[in-house]
């Protein structure tokens, strides 16, 4: 990307619920999840990765009406010291990091909360290599988990069978909430599948992962794969994308992932990994380019860059701005 451009991606954010004691805990709304995150002090909204070599942190936060703006940074000690050169003048300069320093990157994130709490929230995330949406998701889940220590009662639910404990009170069980980002499918994927040539579909399950394949367990199963083919040349159909998606949804209980190998209408070979529940393909997440900035954009900010944030908010539906 040019120094005066940014790329942003579209996602849906929902909150899942799980429990060791009960199979179907009730999830909370995205709004409630962010209310719980706000319980964590701003200085504690962070997460260590790679044994402390990478550090994620929120450096700015604003919640106005139904729009939440967040600036997320990553300090990476694994990055080599950047080198700058002027070959014409045979000059070379290395910007050496000091002990404890990491090279810093940041992304802006805008969350539009839904009017109906049962619906997912729209999320627009600025692109940065090494600080993608699912790295951001890990930070959100860390903060949500930290909120559990500050307000454990918000992570308890009454047992639905109405059973009582030894003190005559209705039993409760602990619940864990997690943020889940699902990319918006771009029209490119639908067009490429509908007008291209689908070569193979692989349905993948991890249900029996780590099952021993020899006597002492030295060789273990990683996953099971079911390979399917389509009669593209014998029986061509117009809406292959939805046909494939329908198969995924029927098999979602047995297979959690899928790979689709196909040739695009222009003859390019592609392999796309998808989620069998929602049909998501990260390589085809809807995206938008932001340009027209009258100054060079930085790789890292410690406070919101208002011009970037403003252009991102312009992409939200009108009733959310």
Image (spheres, rainbow, N blue to C red):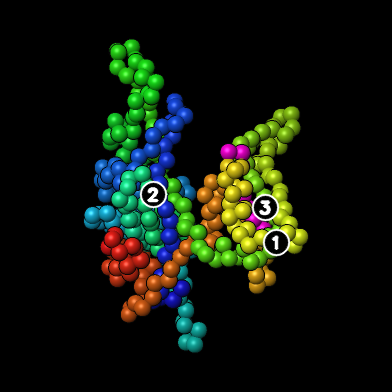
List x then y, in percent, for residue 263. 67, 65
List x then y, in percent, for residue 109. 35, 59
List x then y, in percent, for residue 26. 39, 34
Circle 2: element type: loop
Residue at the image point whose x is 36% and y is 78% from the top: 292
Range shown magenta: 253-261
Rounded to the nearest angstrom, the CA distance separating label 3 from label 1 is: 16 Å
> Which residue in the protein does label 2 denote?
120
How busy is the neighbourhood of tag 3: few (under 14 within 10 Å), some, or many (20 plus)?
A: many
List x then y, in percent, for residue 33. 33, 43
57 relative to 186, above or below: above
Residue at the image point whose x is 50% and y is 84% from the top: 87
Q: Earlier in the sequence, mark 3 or mark 2?
A: 2
Rounded to the nearest angstrom, the CA distance separating label 2 from label 1 is: 35 Å
Total numbered badges shown on the rendered structure: 3
> Which residue in the protein does label 1 denote?
236
Q: Specify the label residue 201 is tagged with.
A: 3
Q: Specify the label residue 125 is tagged with.
A: none
Does 257 appear in magenta? yes
Where, by quadrant of the figure, is residue 131 drawn?
A: bottom left
Q: Is residue 187 visible?
A: yes
277 relative to 21, above or below: below
Q: 79 or 19: which is nearer to us? A: 19
Q: Earlier in the sequence, mark 2 or mark 1?
A: 2
Residue at the image point whose x is 68% and y is 44% from the top: 225
How busy is the neighbourhood of tag 2: few (under 14 within 10 Å), some, or many (20 plus)?
A: many
Q: Nearer the viewer, mark 2 or mark 1?
A: 1
């Amino acid at each position: 990307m040019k120094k005066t451009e940014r790329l942003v991606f579209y996602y849906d954010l929902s909150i899942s619920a799980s429990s060791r004691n009960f199979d179907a805990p009730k999830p909370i709304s995205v709004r409630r999840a962010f209310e719980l995150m706000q319980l964590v002090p701003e200085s504690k909204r962070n997460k260590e990765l790679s044994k402390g070599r990478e550090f994620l942190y929120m450096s700015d936060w604003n919640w106005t009406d139904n729009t939440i703006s967040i600036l997320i940074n990553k300090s990476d000690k694994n990055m080599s010291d950047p080198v700058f050169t002027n070959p014409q003048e045979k000059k070379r300069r290395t910007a050496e990091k000091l002990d404890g320093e990491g090279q810093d990157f940041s992304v802006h994130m805008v969350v539009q909360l839904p009017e109906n709490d049962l619906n997912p929230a729209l999320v627009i995330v600025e692109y940065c290599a090494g600080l993608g949406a699912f790295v951001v998701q890990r930070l959100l889940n860390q903060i949500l988990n930290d909120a559990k220590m500050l307000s454990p009662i918000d992570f308890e639910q009454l047992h639905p069978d109405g059973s009582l404990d030894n003190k005559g009170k209705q039993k409760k069980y602990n619940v864990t909430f997690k943020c889940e980002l699902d990319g918006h499918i771009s029209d490119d994927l639908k067009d490429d599948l509908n007008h291209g040539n689908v070569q193979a579909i692989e349905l993948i399950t991890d249900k029996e992962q780590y099952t021993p394949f020899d006597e002492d367990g030295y060789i273990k199963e990683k996953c099971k794969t079911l390979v399917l083919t389509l009669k593209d040349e014998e029986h061509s159909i117009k809406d292959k994308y939805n046909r494939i998606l329908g198969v995924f949804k029927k098999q979602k209980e047995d297979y959690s992932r899928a790979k689709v190998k196909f040739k695009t209408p222009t003859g390019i070979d592609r392999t796309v990994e998808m989620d069998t529940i929602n049909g998501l393909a990260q390589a085809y997440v809807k995206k938008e380019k932001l340009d027209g900035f009258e100054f060079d954009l930085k790789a890292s900010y410690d406070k919101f860059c208002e011009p970037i944030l403003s252009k991102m908010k312009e992409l939200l539906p009108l009733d959310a701005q």
